[in-house]
Amino acid sequence: MKQAYFTVLENTPVARGVYRLVLAGDASDCTRAGTFVNVKVEGFYLRRPLSVCDVYSREEENDTLVLMYKTVGGGTEAMSRLSSGARLDLLTGLGNGFESDNALKYADNARNRALIAKKDAPDAQDGALLVGGGMGAAPLYMLAKQLYARGVKTSVILGFNTLADVILQREMQPFCSSLTVATADGSSGNKGIVTDFIPKNPPYVYACGPLPMLKAVYDRCTDGEFSFEERMGCGFGACMGCTCKTADGAKQLCKDGPVLKREEIIW
Amino acid sequence: MVDLGVTLCGLQLKNPVIPASGTYGFGYGHAAFYSPEILGSIALKGTTEQPRFGNQTPRVAECPAGMLNSVGLQNPGVDAVINEELPRLKSVFSGKVIANVCGFSVEEYVRVARRFDEAEQVGIIELNLSCPNVECGGMSMGATPSGVARVTGQVKKTVKKPVIVKLTPNTLDITALALAAQDAGADGVAMINTVLGMRIDIKKQRPVLANARGGLSGRAIFPIAVRAVYDVYEKVNIPIVGMGGISCTEDAVEMMLAGATAVQVGAENLRDPFACKKIIDGLPPLLASLGVQSITSLIGAAHS
């Protein structure tokens, strides 16, 4: 956890109401996919929590941090008016993030089980299945990149309402073995919802998206991690505004989450 | 060299700045940002006898210059606070803390206060008679002078440590609550808790908070708090811990001028984790520029 000032490099619309915000600053705490930053927006009281979409180091001392956000209210609309050169106050390195190790462990276990049972484990060939709905694609992009770097074979399913909402399809492509885009109206990719395209025995699942999508994905898999959204006060565990009930007791989604393991989740 | 030390109910504080209950957890979370050792004291998260999950989410809503919360006294229960949270806090804060005690009956307040009375790290017991987010207990017991007197009197009979009573502004006359606390033996009052409020989502046409109503905190309530402290200072002779919307060093000084011996900083800790540190760091230069040698000379100085 760190507080740092960033400079806006780019703030460009990439889909209907969706912006890609590229920042320069100290992103040394943003190493894990699924963690988030809390952005102070001039004129608004509480910060805006946004998941990290990408981070990479540059030759100079500054890192480059990529965030994606959708304009859903006054705060994000004000953000959309930020021009390059603007300074932003961020709290970085918030939340637990995804554990990419778990995909590897799960694949190993599945292979071992198949060996013992002396049968093929075809679905365990894939190390991970990433399922994103809408803006949920943003943290999964960084995860796909990290899994790719570790040699994990990754399938990705992204769901959107319509063509105008599709994000990160092109960017995600190089890092996954298969990429399925589903739109509710069929205007891009396959017509349908993400769960229509989840295989029968899916590998380890990483999901991020709206609550009904998370629940539907949960019902179609046996193991994985789910990133939840909640209104937050502070973003670092002080206010207890974003508490949820889990099998391990009450958790702060900002600090103990936003990612919960499948077995912890209570719907 | 400006002297920042104050004495609150017999407790020596190195400065008058204390993070308010509910905005600083049990004190060790903020240690990732700065050492809590710089603080005058720490008011712990409100504690009940049994663990509480609190209210359904959403529990927070943004407002112009402030926020609503309806957390509903989430806490792990007094046993876990004493056995787990206080030892963890001890590793980052060596001073005495303020235990914020909540209950749903007079008897529960007494039992929880008694437990904290035995805890070595606790210097002051703060009775939360002002939480607006629970059905019974909290504000429902503290919105009338008779309710304040009943709980305060019973707790004072039981504990040895100083007791301060945290008062609600959601009442007819907060000075009557403060007088009731003083008459029942309180060693001080802390004020104000949050102001009852609501936001409605115009798209969903429903209240934003799952619990509909919540407590407003933040800059928006600062003038309400200053007025309340000013009025209570004129009526009581026990120390006042002033709070409500303090967000900078100037606000802390203003609150002391109104009559506060010490100040608590609440919502500002949530939007700026360094809030208390900035306020403390700002005191020496601000007091020097005001020609103030000792911060205690500010207490109540706005009164003629």
Image (cartoon, rainbow, N blue to C red):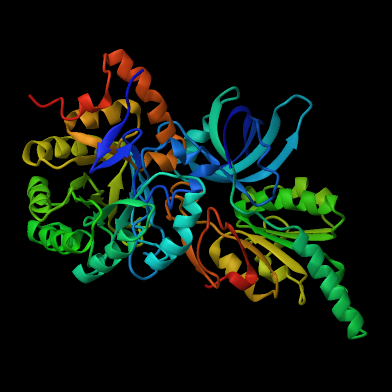
Give coordinates of residue B48: x percent, y percent.
33, 65
Residue nearer the viewer, A109 or A158: A109
Asked if B233 appears above or below B118 in the picture, the reply is: above
Give coordinates of residue B209: x percent, y percent.
35, 57
Residue nearer the viewer, A215 or B242: B242
Question: Residue at (36%, 34%) from the top-left corner?
Answer: B14
Question: Residue at (67%, 48%) from the top-left corner?
Answer: A167
Position of residue A108 in the picture relative to residue B37 (left or right): right
**Numbered disc total:** 0
Residue A73 appears in which quarter of the rendering? top left
Question: Residue at (37%, 50%) from the top-left corner?
Answer: B61
Q: Is residue A195 visible?
A: yes
Residue B231 appears in which quarter of the rendering? top left
Give coordinates of residue A211: x percent, y percent.
54, 64
Position of residue A47 in the picture relative to residue B213 (left or right): right
Residue B302 appears in which quarter of the rendering? top left
Instruction: Pick out the residue farthest to the bottom.
Output: A117
Position of residue B180 in the picture relative to residue B248 (left or right): left
Residue nearer the viewer, A212 or B89: B89
Give coordinates of residue B131: x percent, y percent.
26, 57
Q: Is residue A242 visible?
A: no
Asked if B225 appears above or below B257 in the picture, the reply is: below
Asked if A135 appears above or below B227 in the picture, the reply is: below
Residue nearer the viewer, A128 or A169: A128
Q: Quadrant of the N terminus of chain A?
A: top right
